[in-house]
Amino acid sequence: MIQTPATPGTAAVEGGAERSAPPPVLEAIGLSKRFGTRAALREVSLATHRGELVAIVGPNGAGKTTLLSILAGEARADAGTVSRPAAEIGWVPQQPALYGRLTVAENLRLFARLERCDDVAGAVDRMLAQSGLAERASDRVETLSGGNRQRVNVAIGLLSDPEVLLLDEPSTALDPRQRERLWEFLRGLVDAGTAIVYSTHQVQEAERHAHRVLVLADGEAVYSGSPRDLEETVGASGLGFEAAFVEFLRRRGH
Amino acid sequence: MRWLLLKDLQILRRSPLLVALLVVYPIVVAVLIGLALSRGPEKPRVAILNQVPEGGEVISLGGEEVDTSRYSQQLYDAVDPVRVGSREEARELVRDGDVLGALIVPSDITSKLQSGLEPATVEVLYNAEDPVKAQLVRDTIKSQVQDANAALGRKFTGVALGELDLLVSGGNFSLLGRDFAVLGLGPAERILAQARASLPPSSPVRGQIQQVVDFARFARENLDLSDEVLGSVAEPIRVDARVVDGAGATALSSFAVALAVTVSLMFVTLLLAAGTLALEREENAFRRLVRGLVSRTALLGEKIGLAALCSLVVALVMLAGLALFVGLEWSRAPLWVAAAAAGALGFAAMGAAIGALAREVRAASLLAFMISLPVAFVALVPSGTVSGAVYDATRVVSALFPFDPALTALGAALDGSGGMLLPLAHLLVLTLAFGAAARLGLRRFG
Ligand SMILES: Nc1ncnc2c1ncn2[C@@H]1O[C@H](COP(=O)(O)OP(=O)(O)OP(=O)(O)O)[C@@H](O)[C@H]1O
Ligand SMILES: [Mg+2]
């Protein structure tokens, strides 16, 4: 439906290319993380600006969750810096973080209070409407289907209306209609100036919605730029973005 | 933090099994212990045939009136007595199993006691169908008869000693309302010595009188010793009880109450603290929370406070319940609260450390059980049952966990035995130590 808008700011991700105003709302430089002998992340840098949507794509185990959870303050990097305190960043983790014994509304209300929302009831109602779970508001989360749980999980991350929002595979487990509803909501936030960084395995989703994609492979940032540029880099503009992406990784040995 | 606390209470309310366990368990323990403390084993039903005529229970020993019904009353109190009118009736009741035994007190018992020449005899009939109950009847009657024997024995000895004294020193003796003067060995010896002195030195009778004087002295001196011998015969083993340590030690019933409450406090608090903390991780909520919503220390404080609060309520309800069975001094209630609260905090901090270590609700619960049982056992090892070194080791181990100081504090709070300050300070130190350990565990918790 909506075509990818022009990339705001610069597309520079690695190496701190010179940029004119405005400054990024979130900037990470040289993030590295090891788990034992395995390097989950190698010197990855990322900067994002107001109203920008950045997609992180890459194979399983590439380091997407590791990168996002470091930005979100859940994990600590072995090296590198993040410009923004984690408390100011909205976060939707890959695994639902909810209280099963509480109802949907109670979960939302609890986190709205912990986030110190000004209008707790209003925020809860907004998120119930957004997630399409208004009629299941008083059901316990443990009785919801996996996809509906993910809706609540996403909704909680969206409660606080932050300047920077991170989402780890938010659309996984959602049905197409709810996925569409989520994207509508996220686009609304982006239009209002929120910077969003999300990971996904839905490559078309990256192509359709992201201003910029960051491709991770084996913990390394192997590409950063607009989806269209990736197709051109591969020289396969006729194939579509997904085929270009697979070809790109294949050429690099992944 | 307030919202987290409310959230946890809400989750608890929706975990009916856990709440049932937390509420029912202490109540069951309290009721069991209360019943055990307030009622001994059932008194055996015993048929009693008392053939001693009315008023014939009083015997006279050495001029002293002794009411033997005092001793029979003690026996009747120890059993559930069924009065019967005849030997046949008693026999029938025993045979039919209506009573476990029958006790027949013959009419001549008092006269035999009075004369002291022939042992008085009581007759006991058993129904041995149930060996355990028969044993109970035998033991009950035997121990009562032994008590009566000991008491009467002391009286008899007293009488005999009085008579011996009369023999040695002389004096007046009354029998059947008539007074007799008894010379006594001492005065006899003196009279003989005077008589001998008045005889001429050449008199052959002098030597014979000397022999009688020597005998009288020998008899007197030895009989003088005999009161000690007789005294020890009447009571071959005397129990000289004195408390060496723990002046005003906790009374048994308060100890049992303190133990019941401490054990419940331990389980409830450990399970709650460890479980609710581990639940935060199991639900993945921990990471979300500590990303700026609450600090790890505040989260820990919330769990410790929640567990301590809930278990304090449970402990106080339990104490109130036990107070129905055992006489507890309500005026000391503020001390109970202080002891239970300090114990609850100690256990809660320990539970939080377990929860931080185990990270999963099931593992945390299992670990809490596995750690608390041996801790309680070790704390309850009495001195003298193991070698000195092992006992010292059990003391050291006990000092590392809140069970022992909580038990001491609660015991002291219940009946004022010993000071409370030391165990309370001990609990405070353990709370801080386990709290620090839990906080350390939370660093790698998410
Ligand atoms: N807690 C951990 N302990 C050890 N290794 C870990 C841990 N978390 C992640 N890793 C490793 O780090 C690497 C990156 O993992 P990460 O979860 O970031 O991948 P991902 O790109 O999110 O994968 P997916 O698409 O499957 O979600 C993987 O090799 C993974 O095995
Ligand atoms: Mg992932």
Image: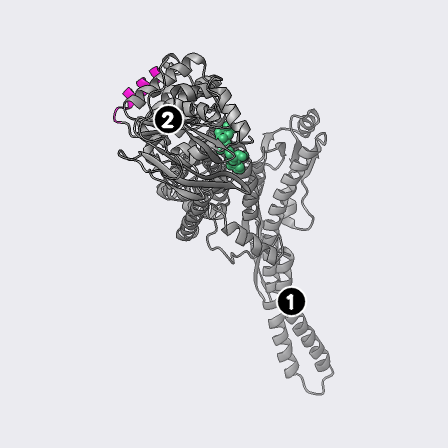
Q: Is residue A209 visible?
A: yes
Chain holding disc 1? B
Q: Left of B229 or right of it: where is B58?
A: left
Q: Quadrant of residue B315?
A: top left
Q: Position of residue A83 (x, y in %)?
A: 34, 39
Of tags 1 and 2, which is closer to the observer? 2
Closer to the camera in the image, A215 or B122: A215
Q: Check residue A125 for magenta coloring.
A: yes
The residues tagged by marks 1 and 2 sit, at their Cα atoms, a distance apart of 104 Å
Which residue position holds label 2?
A157
Q: Which mark is residue A130?
A: none
Which kind of residue does numbered mark 2 sit on?
Gly
Against B285, residue B222 (above or below) is below
Circle 2 chain: A
- Residue B385 x %, y %: 62, 52
Q: Residue furthest front?
A: A235
Main secondary structure of the magenta stretch? helix
Against B28, residue B55 (above or below) is: below
User: Within 10 angstroms of label 1, few (less than 14), some, or many (20 or more) residues?
Assistant: some
Residue A128 in the magenta stretch? The answer is yes
Q: Secondary structure at mark 1?
A: helix
The residue under label 1 is which amino acid type?
Leu
Q: In front: A247, or B176?
A: A247
Give the label on residue B223, or none.
1
Span colored in magenta: A118-130
Q: Secondary structure at mark 2?
A: helix
